[in-house]
Amino acid sequence: MGTLLWALTLPGEKGKEYRHSLGMGKPFGMGAIKIEPKLYESKRDERYRKLFDGDSWHEAVHKVPEKSKKELIQTFEKYILDQIGEEESQLNKVDRIKMLLQMMEWNGPNTDLTRYLQINPINEYKERPVLPDPFNISPP
């Protein structure tokens, strides 16, 4: 559980943003996503004791508190650090992981280049040319 949670949350340095890269647009800086996992615990014994709870199924699913998620991540980190013989207290201090996190840092695109055009206070669409209709396009 801690392995997946660590990989999804990417607990790196404070104040830095990290993104996973998905899809075939990675070389162009596309496909960068932030995953915000929510961890739920299923209590099966409780579920099956109260399976038919009125007109609905009793799920017995509870959201895991943030404190418990952090403890799971710390347990995973301690296990890995012990296995690889590192003296560090956190996994993100290990050189290999620091390199990985550096590659996954996200500064975001320039918002001036990626924002939508505005109509108010100035109509930025006004000076843009209108595309020609298909009848007025000559083949290359």
Image (cartoon, helix red, strand yellow):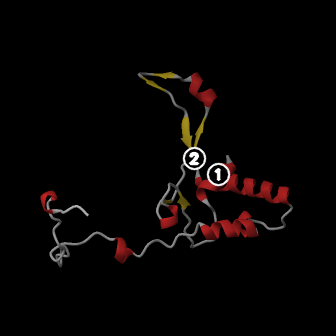
- The mark found on residue 115 in the picture is none
For the residue carrying disc 1, how many other residues have a C-alpha within 10 Å: few (<14), some (14-19), or many (20+)?
few
41 displayed left or right of 137? right
Instruction: Say whether disc 1 or disc 2 marks the residue closer to the N-terminus.
Output: 2
The residue that label 1 is drawn on is: 68
The residue that label 2 is drawn on is: 39
Picture quarter with the C terminus:
bottom left
Q: CA distance from mark 1 to mark 2?
A: 10 Å
Write the residue at 57% across / 46% down.
Answer: 39
In this picture, is 112 found above or below 33? Answer: below
Q: Are marks 1 and 2 in contact (CB under 8 Å)?
A: yes
Looking at the image, can residue 115 be seen? yes
Write the residue at 69% across / 69% down.
Answer: 98
In this picture, is 103 found above or below 67? Answer: below
Residue 19: percent from left, percent from top:
54, 63
In this picture, is 16 found above or below 32? Answer: below
- Mark 1 belongs to which amino acid? Ser
Write the residue at 54% across / 51% down.
Answer: 37
The quarter holding residue 93 reads bottom right
Outermost residue to the right? 85
Residue 27: percent from left, percent from top:
52, 65
- Mark 2 belongs to which amino acid? Leu
Q: Secondary structure at mark 1?
A: helix
Q: Nearer the viewer, residue 29 or 13?
A: 29
